[in-house]
Amino acid sequence: MPLTETTRVAIVGAGPAGLLLSHLLAEAGIASIVIDQRTREEIETTIRAGILEQGTVEVLDALGDFSRARTVGHRHDGIELRFGGEGHRIDFAASVGRGVWLYPQHEALKDLIAARLDAGQDIRFGVSAQRVEGVDTERPTVVIADAEGTVSEIRAEFVVGADGSRSVVRPAVGGSSSEGYFREYPFAWFGILCEAPPSSDELIYSNSPDGFALISQRSATVQRMYFQCDPDADPDAWSEAELWDALQLRVPGTTLNEGPIFQRDVLRFRSFVARELQRGRAALVGDAAHTVPPTGAKGMNLAVADVILLDRALRALLLENDERLVETYAETASQRIWKAQHFSWWMTSMLHVAPDASEFDRKRQVGELTSVVESEAGRAYLAEAYTGWPLA
Ligand code: PHB
C-alpha cells in the first residue's frame, strides 16, 4: 500500500495560480499541499512575459513586503501601437484611469515562493502528479511520485489543477487531456534578451509590412524584444546581425539600441480553452484551463482572476458546506476567459501579418488599426481590456 497523506486542498502546480491559491486559502484557515514536478530553481529561472494588470498587482499586495511588483516593477500608463511607420499612443491613464506593471512572471514567482515558504506552506518541488482519482467522491486523491520515483498519495477534499498547459489534472476533469476549443496561428515569436538600455519608455506593438514586433524591456540595462517568425524557426540559425536587421525592419521610425544578445527563444502560441473546467471535487485554473497568445499580455492575469473565483468557491464549500459556487465556477470563470480569448486573438490578428495575407488583408488591417487609434471608444476598449476588467 502506498503512503497516504491528507490535506484539505491538493494543488498541483507551483506557478502563480497554485501559489496564490495556497496563500488565499491559508488566509481563510484552509490547509493545502502544493506539488510541482519542477525544481524551485527551474521555476524561478524560466523566463516569462511581464505585464501585470493593476488588479493583479493589487492582489499581490496581499503578500506585503514579499511583493516587489511596485518596487522592482515599473508602472506603465500606456502602450504605443505602430503602423504605417507612425506611432500612436494608447493612453491608459487618460482612457480608463488605470495602468499596468512591467514585472516578469518569474520575479512574481520568486515573491510568491518566498512568501509561502515563510508562512510555512507545504510545497513539494520535484514531485510529479501521476493521476487524479475519485473526483466524483468527497475524497479525491492525487497519486504522486517523488524525484526517486517513490509513489504515494495525497487525499484531499478538493484537487486543483494549476499545472499548466500539459495538465495532469485536466483528464480527470474533462475525460481527456486535449478536449477543448482551440486555434493555432501560422506564426510564432522570436524573443531575445539583450544588454542595452530601453529603446522606448513604453512598449511598442508594431505592425509592419514585414510582420509584427514588440519592443519591451526588463530594466535600465536589459531589453526584451520579439518579432514574428515562422513557428518552425531555429533560434540558433540566426546571427546577431540578422536578428537586429529583422527587428529594426519591423519598427520603422525608431532606432533600436543594440547590445549583446544573451538569450533567444522561439515561442509558439495558440488559443485554447478546456471544454470542462470543473467536475465534482476538482477544478482547473490558469494555463491548465486555457492558454492565450502573448500579444494581449493576459496569461498570468487570467490565472489570477480564476484563482480569485475558485478561492471564494472553496471557502464556501469547505467552511460552510455550500457547493453552489463550485458548481457555477466554470460558468463564471468562462465569462472573463472568453473576453480575454477574444482580446488576445484580436490583438494578435490585428498586429501580425499572416503568411498568406493578400493586399486586401493588409489594407484592411491598416484600416482596422486606424479606426482603433482615431476613436476614443476604440482606444478605451483596448485600454480597458489591456489594463484588465474589474476582478470579481
Ligand atoms: C514581455 O515583456 O515579455 C511582454 C510584454 C507584453 C506582451 C508580451 C510579452 O504582450
Image (cartoon, grey):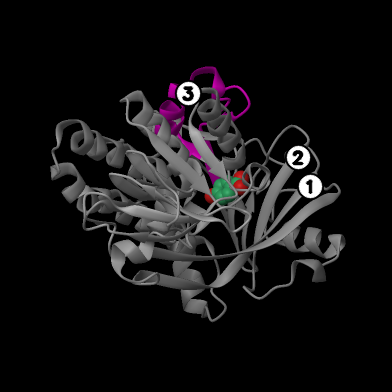
At 55% across and 28% down in the image, what residue appears? 117
Q: CA distance from mark 1 to mark 2?
A: 6 Å
Magenta residues?
A: 52-80
Residue on which disc 1 sits: 194
At 47% across and 53% down in the image, what residue appears? 152
SS category of the residue bearing label 2: strand
In the rendered image, residue 74 lying in the magenta stretch gets the answer: yes
Residue on which disc 3 sits: 63
Using the image as rendered, state which of residue 367 and residue 121 is in the foreground: 121
At 55% across and 70% down in the image, what residue appears? 353
75 over 250 or under it: above or below: above
Whether disc 3's CB lies below 8 Å from ligand 1 is answered: no
Using the image as rendered, state which of residue 43 and residue 12 is in the foreground: 12
The reply to whether residue 198 is visible in this rendering is yes
Q: Please state which amino acid type lies under the numbered disc 2.
A: Val
Q: Please state which amino acid type lies under the numbered disc 3.
A: Leu
- Quarter of the image for residue 208 reads bottom right
Residue on which disc 2 sits: 222
Q: First in sequence: mark 1 or mark 3?
A: 3
SS category of the residue bearing label 1: strand
Using the image as rendered, state which of residue 237 and residue 309 is in the foreground: 309
- Residue 271 placed where, x, y %? 43, 64
| Residue that sits furthest to the top in the current view | 65
In the rendered image, residue 380 lying in the magenta stretch gets the answer: no
Q: Residues within 10 Å of mark 2 (few under 14, many from 20)?
A: some
In contact (CB < 8 Å): disc 1 and disc 2: yes
